Image (tube, rainbow, N blue to C red):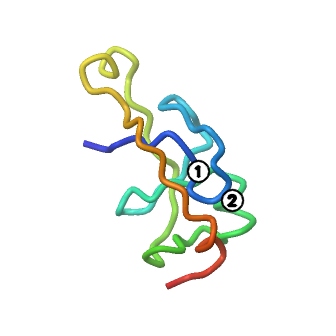
Amino acid sequence: MLQLRPNCECCDMDLPPESSDARICSFECTFCRSCAETVLHSRCPNCGGELVARPRRPLVKLAEYPASKERVLSPNRCGQLS
C-alpha cells in the first residue's frame, strides 16, 4: 500500500492524499508537479526513476488506511540525478 507522503521533497509543498499534483517514483519518493516537471524533468533525484502521477486513494478507504504524516525533505538533492 502506498504511503501517500504529505509533501514535496524539494519545496515542501503540502500534497494531501487527494492531490492531483503529487508525483512519485517506484520507491515512493514524492514531489509536486511543478518540481517534477520543471526542476527534475520527470526523473527522481534519489533513484533516477521516472516520476508519475500518484494514485489517489478513495476517501472511504482513507479512514481505514490513512496517508502518512511523515514529512520528507531533501532540497539539496533536487536537480541532481543519481
Can you tell which of label 1 and label 2 is closer to the viewer? 1
Whether residue 44 is situated above or below residue 14 in the rendered picture: below
Q: Residue at x 66, y 71 (%)?
A: 41
Looking at this view, is 46 or 20 the one in front? 46
Image coordinates for residue 60, horizontal then vertical, percent: 33, 14
- Disc on res. 19: none
Q: Residue at x 24, y 42 (%)?
A: 1
For the residue marked with disc 1, what is the amino acid?
A: Cys
The quadrant holding residue 28 is bottom left
Image coordinates for residue 39, horizontal then vertical, percent: 72, 68
For the residue marked with disc 2, what is the amino acid?
A: Cys
Q: Residue at x 62, y 72 (%)?
A: 76
Mark 1 lies on a secondary structure that is loop
Do the residues bearing badges 1 and 2 touch, measured as CB atoms within 8 Å?
A: yes
Which residue is labeled 1 in the image? 8
Q: Residue at x 41, y 42 (%)?
A: 70
Which residue is labeled 2 in the image? 35
- Crowding around mark 1 (Cα neighbors within 10 Å: few <14, some 14 to 19, many 20+) is many
Q: Earlier in the sequence, mark 1 or mark 2?
A: 1
Looking at this view, is 4 or 72 the one in front? 72
Mark 2 lies on a secondary structure that is helix
The quadrant holding residue 42 is bottom right
